[in-house]
Image (spheres, rainbow, N blue to C red):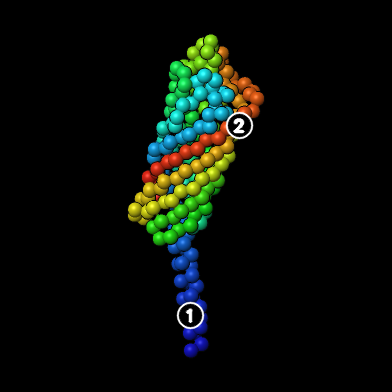
């Protein structure tokens, strides 16, 4: 009889360790996501930068995420976005960004809504375009910081495969412009702020 409490204690400890190990496997998961995106730029700020070549309509491109689920309710991910934009004048426009997302997750079985904050870098580019009516056709690139967030819903098709529509809204502050004199030098720019929004549909693999 004296050994019964000890045996029960050992059994409880063993079950607790197994549960913690299972929870750790569930929580510490990597994921890779890829899918199409639509990117919308605020015309006020980007029109000031691009002049007569202001972005027209919504840009279309793609997004890729590499994520790590730290707990069942929190994850971090590297988010990369790129899109091609039509512009008012000749040439083409584009955007690209690289950011870190801090993701809060609430799981309900196979459905997991989430919110995220985002911080990173953003670039707005014009190729073979002019910013003034009399200016020459050149390449232009504006670079700055990005801060914002968004929301989405992840739906698990299997344990390893999921799909997630998501949307974001970010504030961008451009503070550098790429020289167009052929040297590729980064030159200071009077800071100008704008916003950028995105909508994505991502397919994810989890392991």
Q: Badge 2: few (under 14), some or many (20 or more) residues near its Cα, within 10 Å?
A: some
Q: Nearer the viewer, residue 7 or 85?
A: 85
Residue visible at 52% across and 48% down in the picture = 116
Residue visible at 53% across and 10% down in the picture = 134
Q: Nearer the viewer, residue 68 or 153?
A: 153
Compared with 73, 185 (above or below) is: above
In this view, the residue farthest toward the left is 158
Residue 24, given in percent of the width and then of the height, sits at: 47, 59
Residue 16, given in percent of the width and then of the height, sits at: 49, 70
Residue visible at 37% across and 54% down in the picture = 156
Provide the secondary structure element on which disc 2 rests.
Answer: strand
Residue 193 is tagged as 2
Q: Nearer the viewer, residue 12 or 36?
A: 36
Compared with 76, 50 (above or below) is: above
Q: Which residue is mark 1?
A: 8
Compared with 67, 10 (above or below) is: below
Compared with 201, 2 (above or below) is: below
Residue 83 visible here: no
Whether label 1 touches label 2, CB < 8 Å:
no
């Amino acid at each position: 009889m004296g050994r019964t409490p000890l045996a029960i204690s050992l059994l409880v400890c063993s079950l607790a360790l197994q549960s913690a190990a299972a929870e750790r496997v569930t929580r510490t998961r990597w994921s890779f996501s890829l899918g199409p995106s639509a990117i919308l730029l605020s015309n006020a700020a980007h029109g000031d930068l691009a002049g007569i070549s202001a972005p027209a309509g919504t840009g279309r491109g793609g997004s890729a995420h590499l994520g790590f689920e730290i707990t069942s309710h929190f994850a971090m991910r590297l988010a990369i976005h790129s899109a091609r934009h039509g512009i008012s004048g000749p040439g083409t426009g584009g955007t690209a960004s690289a950011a870190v997302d801090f993701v809060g997750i609430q799981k309900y079985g196979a459905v997991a809504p989430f919110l995220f904050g985002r911080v990173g870098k953003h670039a707005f580019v014009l190729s073979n375009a002019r910013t003034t009516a009399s200016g020459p056709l050149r390449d232009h690139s504006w670079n700055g910081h990005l801060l914002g967030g968004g929301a989405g819903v992840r739906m698990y098709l299997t344990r390893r495969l999921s799909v997630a529509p998501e949307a974001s809204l970010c504030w961008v502050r451009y503070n550098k412009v790429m020289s167009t004199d052929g040297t590729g030098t980064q030159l200071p720019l009077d800071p100008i702020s704008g916003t950028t929004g995105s909508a994505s549909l991502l397919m994810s693999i989890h392991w």
